[in-house]
Image: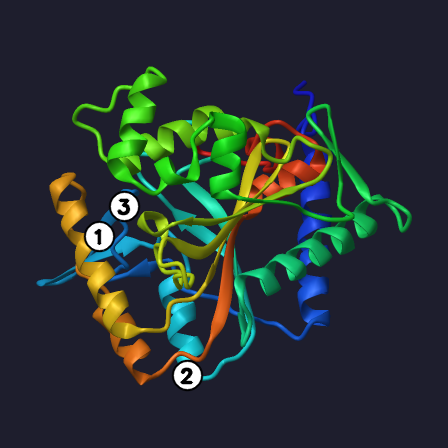
Amino acid sequence: MQIKTLPNNLSAYKKSLLFKEAVHAFLHEKGFLEIELPVLSPELIPESYLEVFKTEFIYNDKKQSLYLTPSPELFLKRLLTRGIGDCYSIGKSFRNSDPPSPLHSFEFTMFELYKMHASYMDIANLVLEMLQFVNKKLNGKESDKINYNGVSVSLKKWEKIRVAEAFLRYAQIKEAQLFDHKKFLKAAREKGYKVEGSTYEDVFSQLYVQEVEPHLGMNGFPTLIYDYPTEFAALAKLNEDRKTAQRFEFYIAGVELGDCYSELTDWKEQEKRFEEEDNKRKQGGRIAHPIDKGFIQALQYGLEPCAGIAIGFDRLAAIFANVKTIEETKLITIS
């Protein structure tokens, strides 16, 4: 006789469902419209730092290359230009060739949110309020703390730190060095990093991961690290100093959870960045895909000032369920 047993992670799975319900409740209360989106597209936004999945639609003699979307951004931005207003999506995204990790999978759930006439710091306030709301729903009305992997974090406020301040505090890299490629690479070499044959972006990322990131979200509060160098602006507006972009990431207990921009609305600048990213993809031998020209056309039509954030939904669910891997928040996995 076969004995049937329930999955040993059923409790974490149920808590992740409650987490999802709480997020929906918060956003509906704030007037955000939930959008369901496709996961296949014939064109993508070019992003040099990630690889994609390619597939093919076949019907009789007709063949069309399609790509699994690495984020819902290209679809949501088109809707924003058509006046959809404050909106969000929680759905599957796909990224190829990423290293295996307990907190990442090639198929994962992305939570992306956009708020009109808002800046990145407005989104920071909204996200903190959402975290507080969700925590009270899951852990009781009086609760303002969460515990993850042995680290206690209060959700009363952000620990805010500029990228330049973080590099000075944790990596002993001065601001004058951080924003000067030659000085930065020299400082990195003196610290023992291999810089020959590497770009500024490569070495920056190494130092960030090795010396800065482990400290983020570890000082009693979630950390909001903001104002990245323009080399990491992606789709974000630049600050008046022209050295930094209006972008932040946030961390809890050393885990990176979200990436936010004040959205770039200048279509000419966006087209230029797309061309640069596409060239980097080609030089890096990435899978070639058509650039989403419709995205540029949508920006030409007009995107009003707004800000958006992408959050790793599985990771945040794991934080609230207090489990070490995103696999533990799922009942069926293929990785």
Residue 287 location, quadrant: top left
Residue behind mark 3: 53
Looking at numbered disc 2 in the image, what kind of residue is underneath it? Arg
Say which residue appears at 76% left-offset and 52% top-offset: 132
For image coordinates 34% across by 55% down, the residue present is: 234
Give the residue at x 23% y 50%.
55
Residue 197, x across and y down, in percent: 16, 27
Q: Which three-letter amino acid code belongs to the residue tagged 1?
A: Glu
Earlier residue among tags 3 and 1: 3
Residue 99 lies, with reference to residue 45, above or below; the image says: above
> Which of the two marks, 2 or 1, is nearer to us in this view?
1
In this rendering, would 4 be left or right of 169?
Answer: right
Q: Residue at x 69, y 71 (%)?
A: 30
Quadrant (top left/top right/bottom left/bottom right) for the N terminus: top right
- How far apart are the alpha carbons under marks 2 and 3? 29 Å
**Number of other residues with Cα within 10 Å of mark 3, as a class: few under 14, some 14 to 19, many 20 or more:** some
Secondary element under disc 2, as helix, strand or loop, is: loop
* Looking at the image, residue 288 lies above or below residue 256: below
3D distance between C-alphas at marks 3 and 1: 18 Å
Nearest-to-viewer mark from 3 and 1: 1
**Which residue position holds label 1?**
277
